[in-house]
Amino acid sequence: MSTAQQIDTNSSVDVMTDTDQYLTFILAGEEYGVDILRVQEIKGWDSVTPIPNTPDYIKGVINLRGTIVPIIDLRHRFSLDEIPYGATTVVIVLKVNNENGKRTMGIVVDAVSDVYNVAAEEMKPPPDFGAISIDYVKGLATVEDKMVIVLEIDKLLNSGVMDSTESLLQ
Amino acid sequence: MAIDITQFHETFFEESFEGLDIMESGLLNLDIGAADNDTVNSIFRAAHSIKGGSATFGFTEVAEFTHGMETLLDEMRDGSRDVTQTSVDTLLQSVDCLREMLAASRDKTPIDTERAAVLKGELEAILASGTNGSTSESTHQEPATPSSDTSASHEGWMIKFKPHHDMLRTGNDPVRMFRELGDLGELSVVVDISQLPVLDDLDPEESYLSWELTLKSDVEIEKVKEIFEWVEDECDFDISEIKSEVPEVDQAAGDNVTESVAEKEPASSTQIKPVAVKPAAGTKTSASTDSASIRVSIDKVDALINMVGELVITQSMIGQLDCDFDDFDNSRMEKLRDGLTLLERNTRELQESVMRIRMLPISFAFNRFPRMVHDLCQKLDKKIELKTTGEQTELDKTVMEKIGDPLVHLVRNSIDHGIEMPEERLAANKPESGTIELNAFHKGGNIIIEIKDDGAGFNKDRIKEKAIERELIASDEHLSDDKIYDLIFQPGFSTAEQLSDISGRGVGMDVVKRNIRELGGSIDVTSEEGNGTTFTIRLPLTLAILDGQLVCVGDEIYITPLVSIVESLQIKEEFVNNIAGQTELYKVREDYIPIVRMHDMFGIDVERKGLEGGLLVVVEGDGKKAGLLVDELLGQQQVVIKSLETNYKRVDGVSGATILGDGTVALILDVDGLIDLSRNPPTPGNKPDNLAREVA
């Protein structure tokens, strides 16, 4: 018991200093991470109400205890093949910042994986790969010999989704 | 013991502004020459509490200014002064000035002392102009005290102050009072400790001291007395005037030279100092001033509490049903059903009560009109009587705030263009004084506001001419009366022969219409040449809830606002016509309306491609009609409007979302937007995923 607590305090101290915690999830066999402080909740996949005339990757909106939250299919967003939603398919509800304030959005992923502590210096800058723009990747972390792609969710979820808002507001 | 007095500022300002409103409406109701005592009293009370409050909170300029008004009102109150048009007008202007001063104090911006000084001078002049009746001698002395007396011999006040033993127990602190006195002028205090008992006998809660205070200042005795107002009954108190034989130059009275108007100079010059300091002290932003609050009558809160009480009772009633479902017999089933019925009723009532909190009587919006009519009449030399009915009709606060400006505009228009000059009216066999009626009432889930004048009415030919001139209509076009009147809502349309600074620039009617539309309402106008014009504004009761018709398109449910639905009908192929093989028109009686295929608009797959068997919901938005092709009509229900924009963005053709009884989200259709969208259809298919393109 006491050791467990010991470790807990240690890790929280770590968080305070130079490591961040990331929630990771699986998408087409790869592990991606998001800042855990941005995660509001994780919920099972449920049906959504589609919104007309929006990009395909916007699955629609759900009712999250009285607020309307848009849901984005990350497979679609990354132009991956679609797979049928199964038992492990989850929606990660994230708090996203943009110029106009905070928004709540959900992303559909294949499954949630784990929570890791990653020290800032362990994070490698992403190489310029072709698949998705490096703007959306904060860095690559190696955890237990696995590569975790840490996403920049503000940029990822605002681009495309919110760009059109701006043009609409003009 | 330091209480942060600023926390009460908000309340003080709110109350003061209310007080000003009371004063304003009271003043407008005053009959010149024969003032009703109650009215004068209520005006006086409002002025008095503003003065008291501002003095307490340290807004000395406001307090001093209000004092002048109060003195004048006091004289009106005790009948020693007649209510004249001049004094009422000056008081009205003072109310305006006071409102600005208070607003400036609230926003911590410099106060316009010049205007205050001018008005103060006018007030003084009225006060100095003498009163009527026997009391003139005494009343005259009051306002004159700071002026003529001071210039001669007045040097200050000698105050003997001996609190009763138990004065301290009532929370009155002599030190505070002395500090206030100190603010009035040079104060010297001599304490008499002869009554002080030995320490052993001393009761710390009793007061044994008495004081002799010498205040060297030219303030009026009233001011001094006011400080002791609260303790009058709890002390021996004597105040006498100190007179010096030689008028001293070093006294503050040094600047009192000429007639009474200029005599207020010392007061206004002392005002400048705190004003200059204020902005520096007030670097804290005044953002908090926007924090909206509403006053809710205690009845409404009580009703709410009752409701919650009942809800708790119902909850415990249901809770008591043992939820052991194995032996769930009929009698329990019955109880459960009863409980749920009760719960439903409670919830509905609770909802209504909560909504009612946001509701304010429309008099909040109507109140500004008497003043406006009064001022404009003077300016234009017209005679207009304003009648309002239904001031108690309640309206959502948000709606109320947004309807204010359009109403002002309409009333202004009526005064400026509607009502004719008195001589014209007499020539047209109408009573000399025109009438503008403001009526508010409920009608079928809507609030109706009518603005009715008995003026000249619209000149249809002139409107048509103007419209042709501006190429809004063709010169040979035949228009129904309604269509002609609708023209005035076109941007830039004005039939006023000459522009005035009141109205007539033609900016406005289109804005009025747009504002009302934004609130989900509509505006109609009827007019009879020579007999007047009536504007009818129809507003929803609240913005948060909407009456909707649920419609089915494919598997999706959408909500159409009930207000925009004209009718719903089953499609018959023989009434469908095609234009150029593209636009489909449907013949509804003598009208042809375009068909909007919802499936195509929203990219929803349906098996049935033809029109046969579909339903057409005829909607009207922005004056244009269209038929929405849907698969099925479901029920009608009230829905709570949720914003899509909070977490997403605006979507064309959709005005918001709501949550249905089963917890799923349904989108609310934006009828205007849909009609526009159907004219400029979105690029077919969904926008491609542009991520890959961005990378490349």
Image (tube, helix red, strand yellow):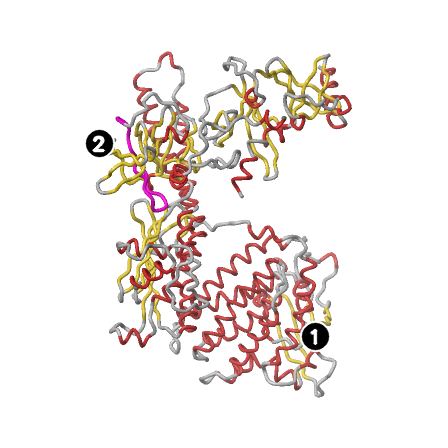
Q: Amino acid at mark 2?
A: Glu
Judge whether B590 appears above or below B500 on screen.
Answer: above
B297 up-or-down from B421: above or below = above
State the image coordinates of residue B546 (x, y, percent, origin top left): 38, 39
Q: Is residue B620 magenta?
A: yes
Which quadrant would residue B10 be assigned to in this image? bottom right
Bounds of the magenta segment: B612-626
Which of the pair B117/B494 is nearer the observer? B494
Overall secondary structure of the magenta section: strand
Which label number is shown at residue B574? 2
Image quadrant containing the N terminus of chain A = top right
Q: Calculate the distance from the C-alpha at mark 2 to the C-alpha at mark 1.
A: 102 Å
| Structural crowding at the residue carrying mark 1, measured as other residues with C-alpha within 10 Å and reported as few (<14), some (14–19) or many (≥20) | many
**Badge 1 sits on which subunit?**
B
Horizontal and vertical percent for residue B117? 59, 74
Q: Quadrant of residue A116?
A: top right
Which residue has dot 1 on it? B214
Question: Which amino acid is tagged 1?
Answer: Thr
Which is in the foreground here, disc 2 or disc 1? 2
- Answer with left or right where residue B505 lies relative to residue B455: right
Front residue of B530/B220: it is B530
Residue B421 in picture, x, y percent from top left: 34, 73
Q: Secondary structure at mark 2?
A: helix
Residue displayed at 37% across by 11% down? B326
Mark 2: few/some/many CA within 10 Å (<14, 14-19, 20+)? few
